[in-house]
Image: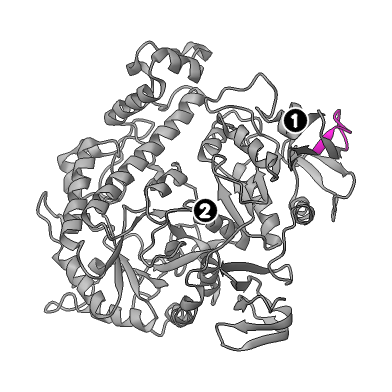
């Protein structure tokens, strides 16, 4: 397993460190401290373009090579970042047309990172040159184990730019998709407000305008911008694969928060790497959800530096961030706790951001492994050194193991982008919040979860959730029917099937192409403002621990062969179905036509666990998070206490504790923010 930090050797030279005679002397001290902390990998180079090419065509990678040599002497491997996230100032001065233009027509100027338009041929050309030069100079260095392409692509709202070069690519993209202007007008529905075009040059970019652009056009713009980012990453991946075929490539992604299709990007990479804001999350289930999303981006064809199947967390926060209104310190043992959560959910590499707080620049008060003074007696260094020692014990245990899930939640960027368009039925309805309600219910029961696009093969899952597939593209409905027909259990919800991939609403009833699957039709839907609620009355064996409200959205459902599980309690649709179930082929299609509070989703999981024969990982108190990695007959359990108080766990059979080497039996008090890593063999279960 790889365990390390993000290192910026360029920050630690004279006059900021070292001496005039030995300007790079601090690098060796850093490497020694890294080894003492159990580290075996660093990432470097991702913001060094201006230092590696201070003038056009005059490359200097010698200093970076020397830094890699220092790491090599210490036995530390290196992930090199291509530096295209931070173009040098001279490039913008010589070619100002590379600077991005925003939707208001304002140029975003040089002097910082991400000051570039990814549709610029000039920027592409210079990016190719620096990547090729770096790979040629350093690609055969024995410490190099992987490349990180760019850094934080799409960050600072730079997923799109509105330059002349962008307009050119946009119109070419539209030509390739629609072939004729007539088809574009028809499938985008541009006759609304009479905005049809007769020439490709007339198709606007969705710039600042008196009112809204056509949502179909805006949705295509998101797809085009995503494809632009994908093409830029793929260009670099292809170059690096050609020049350094033995080094896998990745890029650092955030939890599906930026405006490009992360699933598409993951397919262009050898393995997924993640930026984690774990230490500033208030709810462990929110972070767990993000980690499961990221792990799910690339399920096959994974090639990590050590041959494992998991993902990397290439930026795990070592301390506080610097971009909140108040950047409080991270409490003791919290970094350790959340690092174990990363590993428990499939991470096979963890690098902390960053190695040392810099003395210069805009991130000088960002938390790091070492403080400004570089002292090894600092609290964070000691905590991460403890982790480093534990990783040495854990690495052989988890080698070859992975997370296996029987449950899946469907998510697509197309759908999210469609729901981000203005003029939604209820602006207070959030897809992410809706997904999180389902995820929380599963997390509270310690049920492992994958995420998938609706177009993926779902046959391996016992249970699939499809929260608010507002946009249903052609063929997706058939795939869901096939899944249920073959014995799967599908849970659909309100706000499903209201538009197709062209953002056209169906005239055949809601949910689009799924009325036969669910055995019902949504005749109308009633969006509710925050604070206003209906109530749900349940029938039959559905377990209810609370009175459950209906909030934000109420589908008015007409049954057409389905079983009614719950009804609304008031308003003109009192007595109408709120929740239904329909047998379809060998499986079941369940539909919940509203949104409720968290206790409903907790109850739902209790019921579905029985229906789908989902077994709990371990019998532990509800406040303990349990995850499992497995290989063959070996199962490794991670028990995490996110509380500020101890939690008592009862072990009915002896369990082996990997971190202490001892055996646990009977009652055990898991301390605040405590962690257990246990193994179970077929003869030993709780």
Q: In front here: 536 or 15?
A: 536
**Residue interval drawn in magenta:** 569-579
Q: Residue at x 48, y 69 (%)?
A: 400
**Quarter of the image with the C terminus in it:** bottom right
Give the residue number, with chain letter if any, for mark 2.
296
Alpha carbon distance from label 2 to label 1? 34 Å
Q: Position of residue 450 (x, y in %)?
A: 58, 53
Question: Is the stretch drawn in magenta largely helix, strand or loop?
Answer: loop
Badge 1: residue crowd in 10 Å (few <14, some 14–19, many ≥20)? some
Q: Position of residue 612 (x, y in %)?
A: 74, 53
Q: Which mark is residue 587?
A: none
Name the image quarter holding residue 624: bottom right
Q: Is residue 574 magenta?
A: yes
Q: Is residue 100 magenta?
A: no
The answer to whether residue 190 of the structure is visible from this angle is yes
Q: Nearer the viewer, mark 2 or mark 1?
A: 2
Give the residue number, with chain letter if any, for mark 1.
526
**Callout 1: SS:** strand
Q: Is residue 595 left or right of residue 159?
A: right
Q: In front here: 71 or 317?
A: 71
The answer to whether residue 675 of the structure is visible from this angle is no
Q: In front here: 645 or 238?
A: 238
């Amino acid at each position: 397993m790889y365990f390390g930090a993000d290192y910026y050797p360029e920050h630690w030279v004279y006059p900021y460190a070292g001496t005039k005679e030995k300007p790079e002397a601090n690098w060796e001290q850093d490497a020694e401290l890294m080894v003492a902390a159990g580290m075996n990998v660093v990432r470097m180079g991702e913001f060094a373009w201006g230092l590696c090419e201070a003038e056009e065509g005059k490359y200097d990678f010698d200093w970076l090579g020397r830094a890699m040599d220092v790491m090599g002497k210490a036995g530390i491997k290196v992930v090199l970042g291509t530096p295209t996230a931070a173009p040098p100032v001279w490039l913008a001065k010589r070619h100002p047309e590379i600077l991005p233009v925003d939707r208001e027509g304002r140029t975003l100027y040089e002097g910082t990172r991400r000051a570039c338009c990814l549709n610029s041929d000039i920027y592409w050309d210079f990016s190719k040159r620096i990547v090729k030069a770096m790979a040629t100079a350093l690609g055969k260095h024995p410490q190099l184990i992987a490349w990180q392409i760019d850094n934080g692509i799409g960050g600072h709202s730079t997923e799109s730019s509105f330059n002349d070069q962008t307009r050119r690519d946009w119109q070419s993209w539209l030509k390739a998709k629609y072939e004729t202007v007539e088809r574009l007008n028809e499938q985008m529905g541009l006759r609304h407000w009479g905005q049809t075009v007769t020439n490709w040059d007339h198709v606007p970019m969705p710039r600042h305008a008196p009112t809204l652009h056509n949502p179909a056009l805006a949705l295509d713009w998101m797809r085009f911008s995503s494809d632009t980012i994908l093409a830029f990453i793929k260009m670099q991946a292809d170059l690096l694969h050609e020049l350094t075929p033995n080094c896998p490539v990745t890029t650092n992604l955030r939890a599906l928060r930026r405006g490009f299709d992360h699933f598409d990007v993951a397919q262009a990479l050898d393995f997924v790497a993640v930026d984690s804001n774990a230490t500033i999350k208030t709810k462990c289930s929110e972070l767990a959800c993000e980690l499961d999303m990221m792990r799910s981006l690339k399920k096959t064809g994974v090639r990590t530096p050590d041959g494992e199947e998991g993902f990397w967390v290439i930026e795990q926060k070592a301390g506080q961030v610097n971009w909140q209104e108040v950047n409080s310190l991270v409490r003791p043992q919290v970094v350790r706790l959340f690092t174990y959560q990363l590993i428990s959910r499939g991470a096979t590499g963890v690098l902390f951001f960053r190695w040392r707080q810099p003395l210069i620049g805009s991130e000088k008060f960002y938390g790091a492994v070492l403080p400004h003074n570089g002292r090894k007696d600092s609290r964070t260094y000691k905590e991460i050194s403890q982790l480093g020692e534990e990783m040495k014990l854990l690495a052989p245990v988890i080698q070859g193991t992975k997370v296996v899930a029987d449950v899946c939640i469907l998510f697509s960027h197309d759908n999210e982008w469609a729901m981000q368009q203005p003029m939604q039925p209820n602006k207070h309805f959030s897809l992410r919040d809706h997904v999180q309600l389902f995820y929380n219910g599963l997390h509270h029961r310690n049920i492992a979860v994958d995420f998938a696009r609706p177009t993926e093969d779902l046959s391996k899952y016992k249970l699939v959730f499809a929260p608010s597939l507002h946009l249903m593209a052609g063929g997706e409905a058939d795939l869901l029917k096939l899944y249920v027909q073959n014995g799967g259990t599908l849970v659909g919800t309100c706000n499903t099937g209201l538009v197709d991939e062209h953002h056209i609403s169906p005239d055949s009833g809601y949910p689009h192409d799924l009325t036969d699957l669910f055995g019902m039709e949504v005749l109308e839907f009633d969006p509710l403002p925050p604070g206003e609620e209906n109530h749900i009355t349940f029938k039959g064996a559905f377990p209810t621990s609370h009175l459950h409200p209906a909030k934000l959205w109420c589908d008015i459902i007409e049954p057409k062969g389905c079983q009614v599980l719950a009804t609304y309690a008031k308003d003109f649709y009192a007595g109408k179905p709120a929740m239904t179930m329909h047998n379809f082929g060998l499986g079941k299609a369940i539909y919940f036509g509203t949104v409720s509070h968290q206790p409903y989703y907790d109850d739902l999981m209790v019921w579905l666990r029985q229906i789908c024969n989902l077994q709990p990982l371990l019998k532990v108190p509800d406040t303990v998070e349990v995850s499992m990695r497995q290989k063959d007959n070996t199962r490794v359990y991670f028990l995490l206490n996110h509380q500020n108080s101890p939690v008592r766990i009862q072990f009915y059979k002896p369990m082996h504790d990997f971190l202490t080497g001892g055996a646990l039996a009977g009652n055990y008090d898991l301390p605040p923010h405590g962690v257990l890593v246990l193994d179970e063999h077929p003869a030993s279960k709780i």
